[in-house]
Image (cartoon, helix red, strand yellow):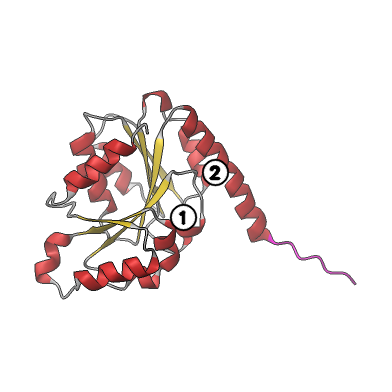
Amino acid sequence: MTIHTIEIRERVMAKNDELAGDVRQRLAQHRVTALNLVSSPGSGKTTLLENTLARLGGQIQIAIVTGDVQTQNDADRLAKHTDKLVQAIVTGGACHLDARQILTALDRIDLTNTDLLFIENVGNLVCPASWDLGEHAKIVVFSVTEGEDKPLKYPKMFREARIAILNKIDLLPHLQFDLDVALANTREVNPELEVLLLSAATGEGMNEWCQLLLRSAKS
């Protein structure tokens, strides 16, 4: 008796990559830069986006798609800082966004009047590392409250990312966190990774972040 094994995961991933190509093509047609923001829960992604909208909302057109497991709380927070549509994708338990969801979200975005698209992924440093959403770059956010070994624990995400943001640096005086060790661990996993140190809450380091975004928009 012959047994045929169906590699479901490979087929699903192949379809996702095909759809990610469609996302990339649509974004390219309108010269929209898409950034996939990934992190573990509580790193400060939403606060970072709130302050980014406050600083850059009058200079470039920013659209946002948020992903969450059960609620649209993050989207509600961000919608207070922009008059553009903030789309919430509630995954119902799935630990990542996929390209089909992003492709569907693009149908409601006025790409002609968009410079930069932020995808705030589900809080998870494992699953989102493997899923191409058609973005130009993954940006991994981790914070000084999470420990210096985050890059070593989740190396694939830090290898896939083009930029790393170490957030909440205003808390450094109050924590036993070795900044040099954290940076060394990051370089060990990905020597090419650009690392930004900032505090989304206090604004420290935000100017450098915003300048990077301005260079990326419509590039």
Residue at position x 36%, y 24% from top?
113
Task: Please name the amino acid that badge 1 sits on.
Answer: His
Q: Which residues are magenta?
A: 1-7
Element marked by disc 1: loop
Estimate the x, y position of residue 63 in percent, counting from the top left.
35, 35
Residue 114 visible to an observer of this rendering: yes
Element marked by disc 2: helix
In front of the other: 144 or 97: 144
Q: Is residue 86 left or right of residue 130?
A: left
The residue labelled by disc 2 is 20
What is the chief secondary structure element of the magenta stretch?
loop
Residue extending farthest to the left is 173
Residue 147 visible to an observer of this rendering: no
User: Mark 2 packing: few (<14 Cα in 10 Å), some, or many (20+)?
Assistant: many
Q: Which mark is residue 38?
A: none
Residue at position x 76%, y 65% from top?
5
Q: Is residue 163 left or right of residue 77?
A: right
Query: Is 6 included in the stretch rendered in magenta?
Result: yes
Estimate the x, y position of residue 59 in percent, counting from the top left.
23, 29
Estimate the x, y position of residue 115 in percent, counting from the top left.
35, 31
The residue labelled by disc 1 is 96
Estimate the x, y position of residue 178 in percent, counting from the top left.
19, 73
| Location of residue 32 (image quadrant) | top left
Query: Is 30 included in the stretch rendered in magenta?
Result: no
User: Is 149 situated above or below 132?
Assistant: below
User: Is 173 situated above or below 17?
Assistant: below
Query: The C terminus is located in which quarter?
Result: top left
Residue at position x 63%, y 51% from top?
14
Cα separation between marks 2 and 1? 14 Å
